[in-house]
Image: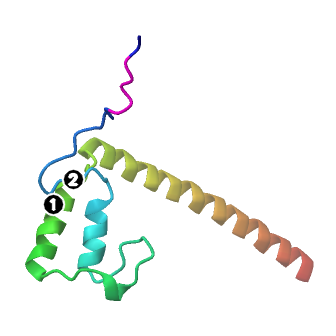
C-alpha cells in the first residue's frame, strides 16, 4: 500500500528579515522612495512614502549590490570606443569627400 504524501507540500524556506527573494525589490523600493510607481501599474497616490534617511539607506544598499567592472574591462571598453570613433570618422570623411566630389562634378 502506497502512502500519499501530497498533503505534505514541500516548500522552499523563505528568507528571514528584510532580505527579499525578489531581485527587483530594491529597485521597487527606490522607485517608491522617489515618489514614483513600483512598476506594477499602481499610481503615485497609493505608494508608501519614506523619509530622506531611509531613501539614502536603500540607495547605499542598492549601490553595494552593483557588480562594478574591473580596471581591465574599463580600459578595454574605452579602447574599443576610441577605435570605433576613429573608424567611423574615417568612413564619414570618405563619404563626405565622395559626395562633395560628386556634387562638384554635377554642378560644374
Q: Main secondary structure of the magenta part?
A: loop
Query: Where is residue 69 shown, x and y percent of the image?
Result: 28, 48
Query: Where is residue 7 shown, x and y percent of the image?
Result: 35, 33
**Residue at 27% from the left image edge and 50% from the top image edge:** 21
What is the image's colouring? rainbow
- Quarter assignment of residue 9: top left
Classify the position of the N terminus by image quarter: top left
Query: Where is residue 93 shown, x and y percent of the image?
Result: 64, 65
Q: Is residue 71 above or below residue 92?
A: above
Q: Is residue 108 visible?
A: no
**Residue 61: which numbered mark, if any?**
1
Q: Is residue 16 visible?
A: yes
Q: Under tag 2, what secondary structure? A: loop
Residue labelled with disc 2: 65
> Is residue 21 found left or right of 1 in the rendered image?
left
As drawn, the residue found furthest toward the top would be 1
**Residue at 31% from the left image edge and 49% from the top image edge:** 74
Is residue 71 one of those drawn in magenta? no
**Residue at 37% from the left image edge and 18% from the top image edge:** 3
Classify the position of the C terminus by image quarter: bottom right
Contact (Cβ within 8 Å) of mark 1 with mark 2 = yes
Boundaries of the magenta span: 3-7
As drawn, the residue found furthest toward the left would be 53
Instruction: Pick the residue in front: 60 or 26.
Output: 26
- Quarter assignment of residue 10: top left
**Residue at 16% from the left image edge and 80% from the top image edge:** 50
Amino acid at each position: 500500500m502506497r502512502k500519499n504524501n501530497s498533503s505534505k507540500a514541500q516548500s522552499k524556506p523563505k528568507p528571514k528579515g528584510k532580505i527579499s527573494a525578489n531581485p527587483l525589490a530594491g529597485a521597487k523600493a527606490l522607485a517608491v522612495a522617489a515618489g514614483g510607481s513600483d512598476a506594477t501599474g499602481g499610481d503615485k497616490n497609493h505608494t508608501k512614502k519614506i523619509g530622506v534617511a531611509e531613501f539614502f539607506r536603500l540607495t547605499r544598499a542598492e549601490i553595494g549590490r552593483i557588480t562594478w567592472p574591473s580596471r581591465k574591462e574599463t580600459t578595454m571598453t574605452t579602447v574599443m570606443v576610441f577605435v570605433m570613433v576613429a573608424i567611423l570618422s574615417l568612413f564619414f570623411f570618405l563619404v563626405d569627400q565622395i559626395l562633395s566630389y560628386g556634387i562638384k562634378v554635377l554642378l560644374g
